[in-house]
Image (cartoon, rainbow, N blue to C red):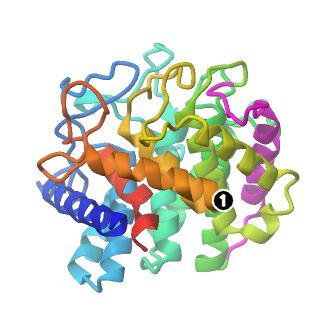
Amino acid sequence: MQKEQMKTICDDIVKYLLKVQDFTPGEYYGSFWSEKAYHGPLLDYNAGGSHHNRGAGSAALGLWLIGKKNKDPEMMHRAELAFDWLTSRQHSRGGYFEIQNNEKPSDWERTGLEELSTIETAFVVHGLGTALLNGLPPKKSYLDCLKKAGHWFLSIELPSGSGIFPHHERSPYDTLNATLHSAESLALIYWTVKEVYKIPIDIFFQGACRGIRHTLPLQWENGCYPYRDYGYSTINYTSLVLWCLLNTLDVIPEKFRKERNVFWNVEKACSFLRNCVNENGELIWEKNETSTAKHNIWTYIITSNVLIRAGGTENIKTSEKIVAFIIGKKSKSGLLPMRDIEEEITECAYMQADFLLFILPFIK
């Protein structure tokens, strides 16, 4: 029953993404328009929409995978157009701007200078690399995009060789999910370029290893991966670190399984996540979530994703509880809302695109 209900949600998300794909002639052709944009810490969905780079990465991958499964050439073509748009938006240095409301690039450090984002770039790489490994035509523009992104990730590792990859340029913090996004991206770039284009670039693989070796020991005794190395308990970013790690293991499992304590760290994180879920499948936010992700449905879906992928009776049982809660939150439109409280907002394209990717393991 859950599988069928989640498939229905996926179908409705796909319909929404196809509806908001932008084919207006000009600079946004092939991208996705988000009527209700969002960017923490403001949590203001009504401050003006945007075409998000990361949203296009997730949406294009979702459309490609579903189009291929359903043998739908039109959907696959639309996914390819979105990837073409993404390659055209890449900064000359190799990264991507994190887009906030009204098409404005982020300025977390308030410097007024250009600020490329690890997270934005990582979601683009995740979409493009995974699609290439699943049959996306291997254009030279895609190869160039992945190589430039890989070199950009290595360029922001500070100190050089440390395995610390910041959230964005000029960030002074050791942010765990940013490092794991970078590690996943570097591993995926290494493997995609090697397998699809037959070009091995070992420095990307080594960068991924450094990121994982640096981050795993920062896990707390209770299994939480804090938002930053000095604190902030979080369900959201523990799940995100775990998602990046599992993605990396999926891409090149044999080499990363040799990394010390990887599976011990995974189960320890799952234990923390299980303890953050009540019997009704609702996340226990108080004390466990100190980031602006509190109350986001996004957190429910990624947490259920990593628990079911990690496997084991208790993880799967907890994941199913979360899924039941998610299904109960479905709006009349068929889309999931952005938050578990307050105003019902659904028209946020990049979050819906991520929902689609996180839900796919439940309907395979």
Residue ranking furthest to the top:
110
Residue 182 left/right relative to 264: left
Point out residue 189 in the picture as x, y percentages from the top left corner. Answer: 62, 62
Nearer to the camera, 244 or 202: 244
* 281 is within the stretch colored magenta: no
- The residue shown at (12%, 48%) is 332
Q: Is residue 86 visible?
A: no
Point out residue 127 in the picture as x, y percentages from the top left corner. Answer: 45, 60
Residue ranking furthest to the front:
279
- The residue shown at (17%, 51%) is 26
Q: Is residue 103 above or below residue 121?
A: above
Which secondary structure, mark 1? helix
Point out residue 113 in the picture as x, y percentages from the top left corner. Answer: 46, 21
- The residue shown at (36%, 39%) is 297
Q: Is residue 332 visible?
A: yes
Residue 122 left/right relative to 265: left
The quarter of the image holding the N terminus is: bottom left
The quarter of the image holding the C terminus is: bottom left
> What residue sits right under mark 1 in the picture?
248
Q: Which residues lie in the magenta part? A: 199-228
Point out residue 105 in the picture as x, y percentages from the top left corner. Answer: 37, 30
The tally of labels here is: 1
Which amino acid type is shown beneath numbered disc 1?
Answer: Thr
Q: Quadrant of residue 65?
A: bottom left
Q: Is residue 96 above or below residue 81?
A: above
Residue 135 left/right relative to 272: left
Nearer to the camera, 171 or 134: 134
- The residue shown at (20%, 60%) is 12
Residue ranking furthest to the bottom:
71
* 215 is within the stretch colored magenta: yes
